[in-house]
Amino acid sequence: MNSFFKDLLSKSYGERLEEGENINPFDRESLFSSPVSTSSCQNATVSILILMDNRVASNTLTLSGLETDSKISLDTFNHLLRTAFPETNVTQRLDYAKGNMPLDYSALINNLSKIFEIELNCSVVQWFRKKKGIEMPEYYNKYQPDKTVVYDAEDLNARRGGELATISIGKIVRMMDKHKGELPQPIQEAADEFLPFAVKLGKGRNASLHTEVVDESQFIEFYNRFCTFVREGWFSMFIELKESLRMK
């Protein structure tokens, strides 16, 4: 990981000086933190920082059972959120950080939407693959040789770079909407409530990947929808589904 991203994932130099850390300003190891290791993330407690009145609050929203890549994305999101919405003295610190220029919040949306996409691919997509004859758990989230699985014109057993190819949020949501009756009972019963939120999250993901600047209001709207998805227990249904598919 290069020094620019290490710096984003650590406390600012000024914050560390304020806390009394002994920092040599000419020492790279003092200025930049070590990259997050995959093994440490696997056992980490995972929480989403909460925004209240445009400030990072002391309380958090807990998520469990996430994939390692999802945990890394969430940890990155929390670090970036502290930069965009400091805990104290919001106006002064933001003005100092951005020089009164507007911020692009694409990175924040991208991290949360990536979590959503990863977890849908590891749950709902695997469910549809199993219904089409992919052997579970042997080929859970893996390519099964000599097997063709086409669902709504989507190849659910395609390979990309040697790994099972992922499906976009928008396509997964359309599959769920069209085939609600084939989903597990708890997800099926909640589908009419969560699908509108899932559609919006998919659109937010697309917006964060395009050239347009994503402003603060767009980010807050996306962030609130994501948190609602967690608070309502909808996210947990997908976590439980993927765990059941992994079991022998």
Image: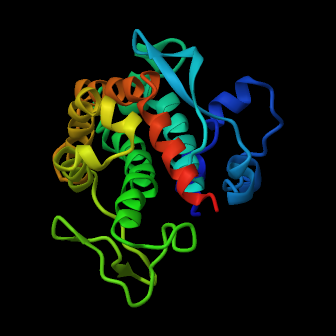
User: Measuring 71% from the left and 56% from the top, which residue is drawn there?
Assistant: 28
Instruction: Give the residue at the far bottom of this rendering.
Output: 146
Residue 110, relative to residue 89: is it above or below? below
Say if residue 33 shows up in the picture: no
Say if residue 18 shows up in the picture: yes
Residue 137, relative to residue 57: is it above or below? below
Residue 173 image point, x, y percent: 24, 47
Residue 177 image point, x, y percent: 19, 44
Q: Nearer the viewer, residue 59 or 96?
A: 59
User: Measuring 52% from the left and 49% from the top, which residue is drawn there?
Assistant: 70
Q: Quadrant of the C terminus?
A: bottom right
Instruction: Give the residue at the far top of this rendering.
Output: 53
Q: Quadrant of the N terminus?
A: bottom right
Q: Quadrant of residue 184?
A: top left
Q: Decide if residue 40 is on the left or right side of residue 172.
A: right
Q: Quadrant of residue 150?
A: bottom left
Q: Decide if residue 176 is on the left or right side of residue 73.
A: left
Residue 68 image point, x, y percent: 60, 54
Q: Quadrant of residue 133?
A: bottom left
Identify the image's colour scheme: rainbow, by chain, secondary structure or one colour: rainbow
Residue 122, relative to residue 10: is it above or below? below
Number of residue marks: 0
Q: Nearer the viewer, residue 8 or 245?
A: 245
User: Measuring 30% from the left and 82% from the top, which residue is drawn there?
Assistant: 148
Residue 97 image point, x, y percent: 43, 31
